[in-house]
Image (spheres, rainbow, N blue to C red):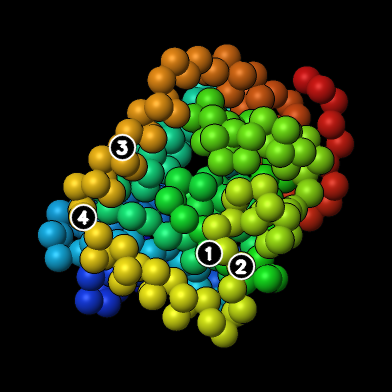
Amino acid sequence: MSSTAERLTLERRTQTAIVTVNRPEARNAMTFEMYDALERCCEEVDADEELRVMVVRGAGGTFAAGTDIAEFRDFSSGEDGLAYERKLDGIVGRVEAVRKPTIAMVEGHCVGGGLAIAAACDLRLCTPEAKFGMPIARTLGNCLSMKNYARLVGLIGPGRTRELILTARSFSAEEARGAGLATEVVPAEELEGRVLELAERMAGFAPLTLSATKEALRRLRLAGLPDGHDLVAECYGSEDFRAGVAAFNERRPPVWSGR
């Protein structure tokens, strides 16, 4: 088994596929290769008629801390940011487009790209200790794609999306449930059992009804979505983004210039 395969695994439990992000020593930060492996898992789940539900989880008590900052070290222009956001849109969009119900099983931190993946799932069950955040205004100085902004607005509304990103703070599990981001809050020792119980129940429902509903809602969200490439290029091509990446790697607070 390759190192990438070990970092992202797919396990079958009767009619449920469990995809595990397995890089706990880095809080399950996602490399580009891991994103590619996630996309392959989605393809595999859709191709297997015996699988009816997909669960995404993280190993070691953390869902995912987003994209590994090392992937940004060679970024030098807005074009690099556009290429990255196109890639992320493709991966996250593929999670959303899985024809079968998807459940994010959230423990610990679910931030950045990890939150984007969880938001692309149909349901999100979490422990009381879970934290949901998009701290890019505090950490890197980048921005989201229009598709990811729209996905968050569709889940929690524009006001909560503003609060999540403009304050750069994490939502607690109960706040996330109140906002519509978390579907259920379940004690840690009961989370896996509850997720598998829910998956088994949905596996017994009409597959075409579920897939049609998922696709209809996806199309409604994307209808009339404006272009935001200029915003992505401005943020990723900025001095602030390069300063944010450098500060993150050096474990110090960034100094923002607005350029």
* Mark whose residue sits in front, 3 or 4: 4
Instruction: Judge left or right: residue 41 versus residue 133.
Output: left
Residue placed under numbered mark 1 in the picture: 125
- Image quadrant holding the C terminus, namely top right
Q: Is there a contact, CB below 8 Å, between mark 1 and mark 2?
A: yes
Give the residue drawn at x 83%, y 51%: 252
- Compared to residue 253, the image places residue 51 above or below, namely below
Q: How far, Cα to Cα, is label 1 from label 3? A: 21 Å
Local SS, label 4 = loop
Where is residue 161, by image quadrant? top right
Looking at numbered disc 1 in the image, what kind of residue is underneath it?
A: Leu
Residue placed under numbered mark 3 in the picture: 215
Residue placed under numbered mark 2 in the picture: 185
Q: Is there a contact, CB below 8 Å, between mark 3 and mark 4?
A: no
Q: Earlier in the sequence, mark 1 or mark 2?
A: 1
- Image quadrant holding the N terminus, namely bottom left
Q: Is there a contact, CB below 8 Å, between mark 2 and mark 3?
A: no
Neighbor class of circle 2 (other Cα within 10 Å; few <14, some 14-19, many 20+) is: some
Front residue of this view, candidates 240 and 172: 172
Instruction: Judge left or right: residue 43 versus residue 24.
Output: left
Front residue of this view, candidates 157 and 145: 157
